[in-house]
Image (cartoon, rainbow, N blue to C red):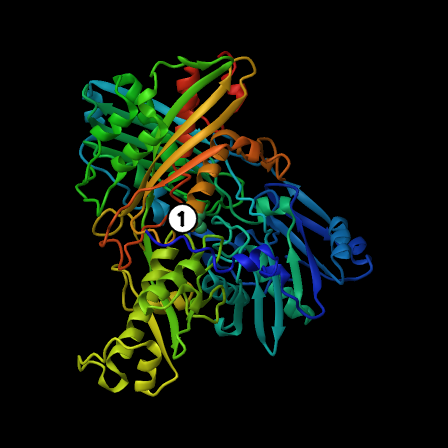
Amino acid sequence: MGQPEPRIEARLKVTGEARYASDFPVSNPAFAFLVTSSIAKGSIQSIDLREAKSVPGVLEIFTHENTGELKEVKFGGGASTSIQDLGPKILHDGQIVAMVVADTFEAAREAAYKVDIDYKAEVPSATFKSPGVTEEDASKVSATAKDLPQAGNAEAAFAAAEIKLDAEYGTPAQHHNPIELFTTTAAWHDGKLTIYEPSQFVYGLKNSVAQKLGIDPEQVHVISPFVGGAFGSKAQLTPRSGLVAFAAKKLNRPVKLVATRDQGFTIATYRAETQHHIRIGAARDGKITSFIHEGSEVTSRPDPYSVAGVEDSARLYGYGAVKTHVQLVHADRNTPGFMRSPPVVPYIYALESAMDELAIKLDIDPVELRRINDSMKDATGKEWSSRSLMKCYDQAAQSFGWSNRDKKPGSMRDGDWLIGWGCASAVYPTHLGAATARVQLQANGKAQVLIAAHEIGTGVRTVVAQMAAERLGIPVSAVTVETGDSALPPSPVAGGSNQTASCCSVVMKACDAIKARLLLGADTVGSGTPIGNDSIEEKFKRLGVGAIEEYAEFLPPEGKPDTIKKLYAGTPLLGGGSKGEKLMYALGAEFVEVRINARTREIRVPRMVGAFAAGRIMNTRTARSQYLGAMIWGVSSALHEATEIDPNVARYVNDNLADYQIPVCADIAEVDIILVPEHDDFVNPVGVKGIGELGNVGTAAAVANAVYHATGIRVRELPIRLEKLLGV
Ligand code: MOS
């Protein structure tokens, strides 16, 4: 367990000094405002800009008619962006169809409302089962859904099972809604472009914007030192970035865009709705003989984006046989994308609800059912590198007081309040990416780390500083860390919870190289003659230099000779999880108490306990903060969040923060986080598993299971709102 160092940028953040993308001053900026499509399917017939152009201060209006120079770009997850750029074809509601640029924000906004577009509208397909959707097998079209786990004859084993569970679950569309809006500022100087945009991958943005504009990536510089919430929504190129850069070039003036909250629902990605058909066959003793998980996911018309979480649900326990399938449903919607714990949040909610239902059928305690099926091997025979699931269950159960639970639904009542206790597993693959870094140690004992990591709120600067301090034998306060700038050596996308493991691995390598030079002396490197235990200052004196700098490249086991070159070109490698030689995952157990008012059906969550094992924890303070936020988000998923879609027009209805329900302080009471020690040298040189996406994986199922325990009502469609509990 690492020290609970406070975030090194904490002071900047609390004093408001931290600069986010749209805070950067540029000289004489023009302001942009987007116009988005009011239909979900069809085409633009004509655009009348006369009224809009007559607004004083309007400089130019960009539409599909004058942006033909922008190139098509495909980036990550199979998501294409250009096809949804500007039209004339309309592929989803809220598609960007024009951008007004003016001297002031107000003029741009006024003119944007005066852009008159004549559409030829067709009837759109909104979601599952809407007329006109098309379906396909995800494994045939999506890279994430290739080679999904299959083992033995799961259908036959299910047919022969003593105890069978057959149930369907559903999760709604959700939007990230980071507090920092989707912004882009572009400025050109001497043929070079600087982009200020909140990004989870500055090298990806740099290269894909260059591609979009058809210019050399070396002409593009991305600056993104702090990101005000991302959760996956700022990991990929979206249509706005190239458009703003293009406008700045045409107008020969910096252009600043801050999209509105409602536009954020359709100009970026989101978590699409999913459906699950789960069948589990078990012996009477609780041993699972067959696990069948068939998922369906909504995506856009052109893009086969898929999260395919059966990859993980089918590995979590030692099932006898496994069958998995993922079906994609193409509707007239914007392309979905990563959202915190993309595969496992919906798929593990379904699995962990099913496990609870199975436990009830078997009359076995839900914790014991997990223990019976705990295994160091999955059904395909692959072994876990380390697995502390039951340690997490035991510690969380004890802290929660699980042994006092009366298993009968509705039996634990406190006056008008029905009390329910539920639990569920959390799981997240341990990813590891290729990364580079430059570290400099000075004779005065101060060090500087340069790495294009991404401070998305996770505390990456702090853990990187801790790693450098530890390896160089200096205090954390002597280390400065620069991140979030494409002029720095690249690190992978800050996604898939890989950042701490990847960045700390490369920083460790660079620091060790510095240490080697210091210990041996510059001209005696390799001679094996250590100089002794004198101070850093004395060592430098002996070497006769003022500073030592090392650039390091770190390659995960899946790395190839061109992996680093590809990283510089904006294509990160993320290995690990289920794809490596062993199964590498972080695990946890979450316990929840709900109280449901017997008269009003009001649902409360007075306390939660989460115990998590994720290898080495670099910083117990930032780790706890990640888990807290994640479990709170889990409550949000369970009880509040859903992007409502009007089925007739395929439009998001609650595209604002007043109607998009999330928990407030009054909804969250006690949250107890237990960090379970775990040592795993196999996962990576630093022994770190990812934690950013682990904590919100089990919460929704734990809440659903607790709601069943309180009421005897099994809600299989999230979110669980009181109208689903009428009749208690
Ligand atoms: Mo995270 S949703 O993997 O960017």
Residue 603 appears anywhere in the view: yes
Point out residue 469 in the picture as x, y percentages from the top left corner. Answer: 36, 65
Looking at the image, residue 662 lies above or below residue 18: above
The residue sitting at 67% across, 44% down in the picture is 119
What amino acid is found at the position of numbered circle 1 in the picture?
Ala
Count of numbered tags = 1
Q: Is the CB of mark 1 within 8 Å of ligand 1?
A: no
The residue sitting at 44% across, 19% down in the picture is 419
Residue 403 sits in quarter: top left
189 with respect to 108 (left or right): left
Looking at the image, residue 366 lies above or below residue 559: above
Instruction: In this rendered view, identify the residue nearer to me: 454 or 445.
Output: 445
Residue 406 sits in quarter: top left
Residue that numbered label 1 is attached to: 623
Instruction: In this rendered view, identify the residue nearer to me: 117 or 435.
Output: 435
Residue 351 appears anywhere in the view: no
Point out residue 477 in the picture as x, y percentages from the top left corner. Answer: 44, 65
Looking at the image, residue 557 lies above or below residue 442: above
Looking at the image, residue 644 lies above or below residue 243: above
448 with respect to 281 (left or right): right
The residue sitting at 43% across, 59% down in the picture is 462
302 with respect to 442 (left or right): right
Point out residue 49 in the picture as x, y percentages from the top left corner. Answer: 76, 55
**Circle 1: is it few (<14), some (14-19), or many (20+) Cα within 10 Å?**
many
Asked which secondary structure carries label 1, the reply is helix
Instruction: In this rendered view, identify the residue nearer to me: 280 or 417.
Output: 417
Point out residue 304 in the picture as x, y percentages from the top left corner. Answer: 42, 46
Residue 65 sits in quarter: bottom right
Instruction: In this rendered view, identify the residue nearer to me: 303 or 661.
Output: 661
